[in-house]
Image (cartoon, rainbow, N blue to C red):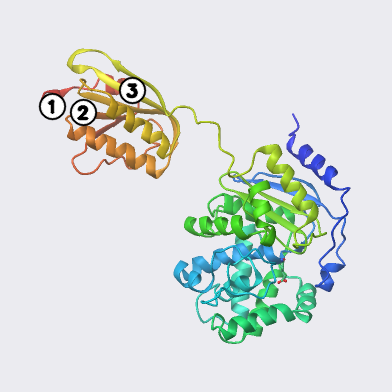
Amino acid sequence: MRSMIPDYLAEALGEVAADTTGETAGYIPELATADPERLGAAFAMVDGEVYGAGDIDTAFTIQSISKPFVYALALSDRGFDQVLAKVGVEPSGEAFNEISLESGTGRPLNPMINAGAITTHSLAGPEGLQPAERVERITDGLSAFAGRRLKMDESVHASEMEHAHRNLAIAHMLGSYGVLTGDVRAVVDGYIRQCSLLVTARDLAIMAATLANRGVNPLSGERVVPEPVVRQVLSVMFSCGMYDAAGDWATQVGIPAKSGVAGGLIGALPGQIGIATFSPRLDSHGNSVRGVSLFERFSSDMGLHVMEVPAAARAALRTHHVVGSGPGALRVLQLQGGLGFAGAEKVVREVVGTAHPEVRVALDLTRVHSMDDVARRVLLEVVRRLTLDGHEVYLVDPEAVMPDPDPGDGGRVTVVTHLDQAVNAPDADLRSRPQ
Ligand code: GLN
């Protein structure tokens, strides 16, 4: 069978191709001359499988799509406190190049607008780096996100530098508030170099998939940034990534995203997919016209909106029954699926609401494929409290979905790989149950 996913992508491109509205970015002469008909879309799954249609191997400059990745590098290199002291996380509702700072603090409102991005550029790498070393750190970091070495387009850099009055104005203002220190012109030069890194839609999809995959590049297996950094970056992309169109985007598309004025657009859906589109004509916000249409379509066709409420998960508690009778009887709670807080809470409620004459209780995890840390801790506390109430507790866990099953203070659990082992276990402890 041939996969239908590239066919779907090609069909989606065909539908938006007729739309020739919008303009290439006029304020950077090198970008104004881009071929406006280029059009491509790529999906990268979190296991590294890539699907694409159209111009997915055409190189273009990353521009503002570098911002979330450099923010991630700054957070990893300097820590949250240092970065948050200098750049906020509030949506500005303003254009990307607005000359604005938070009143009172002088901080840029968020790292997705230029004021914030110029500041986070200055925070990448350890303190005291030379401007060229900082660009090197950023090139290395973005290359790790992409899974291949990225190169810079010197002519786009030179072209933008000649017309960088606005970014220089922003940088001087940041300098006057002490948010930027040292040679602010060198910071703008470095920021524009960062924006001039060349990528393809395929690269961008992998970069987005690295975010969707908790910071681990699905191709190289490299952990590029820590998980808490990814959560921070995706949150800011969700609220601020599309500038003054962020609210429309959040409601209609609902995928953490970032656009760039060369026509790229990325979206990262946590745990599922990285998406990238490329089409150079821009709307009045500086977002790719066809890119926005493609994302609207992808989101509705494939139910990708992050606020889409999933169909009520299948009951976490599959069955609850007693095997055998007399003092050796075993009460079995069989759980299933992926367990988070809500699934674990069902178990707590069931255990609390049942009078347990049986001494022996088994939590059967055979049909559980995963559990998060909260579910793990809640279930271990169930085990501990059952032990303290005088029960002998078994965990049936053939796939070891519960790492480190230590119920802690006063708790005791016997881990087995098959329910029969619990059913037939010697019941030596039975008489120790306080009556
Ligand atoms: N280099 C561009 C600038 O700073 C990036 C803007 C963008 O892609 N939105 O103006």
Q: Tell me the kind of residue under disc 3.
A: Leu
Question: Is the CB of mark 2 within 8 Å of ligand 1?
Answer: no
Secondary structure beneath label 1: loop
187 up-or-down from 389: above or below: below
Picture coordinates of residue 49, whole percent (x, y): 65, 44
Q: Which quadrant of the figure contains the N terminus?
A: top right
Q: Nearer the viewer, mark 3 or mark 1?
A: 1
Residue 68, by quadrant, is bottom right
Q: Which residue is tagged 2?
A: 392
Above or below: residue 175 compared with residue 51: below
Res. 298 visible in picture:
yes
Residue 435 placement (x, y as % from top left): 10, 24
Q: What amino acid is at disc 1?
A: Arg
Q: Nearer the viewer, mark 3 or mark 2?
A: 2
Q: Nearer the viewer, residue 417 or 197?
A: 197
Dot 2 or dot 1: first in sequence order is 2
The residue closer to the viewer here, 167 or 65, is 167
Label annotation for residue 433: 1
Most extreme residue toward the front is 103
- State which tag comes first along the sequence, 3 or 2: 2
Q: Separation of disc 3 and disc 1 at Cα? A: 22 Å
Q: Is residue 364 left or right of residue 50?
A: left
Callout 3: SS: helix
Image quadrant of ligand 1? bottom right
**Disc 2 and disc 1: Cα gap in Å?**
9 Å
User: How many C-alpha atoms fall within 10 Å of the one at disc 3: few (<14), some, or many (≥20)?
Assistant: many
Point out which mark residue 419 bears: 3
Q: CA distance from mark 3 to mark 2?
A: 14 Å
**Which residue is located at x 55 percent, y 59 percent?**
233
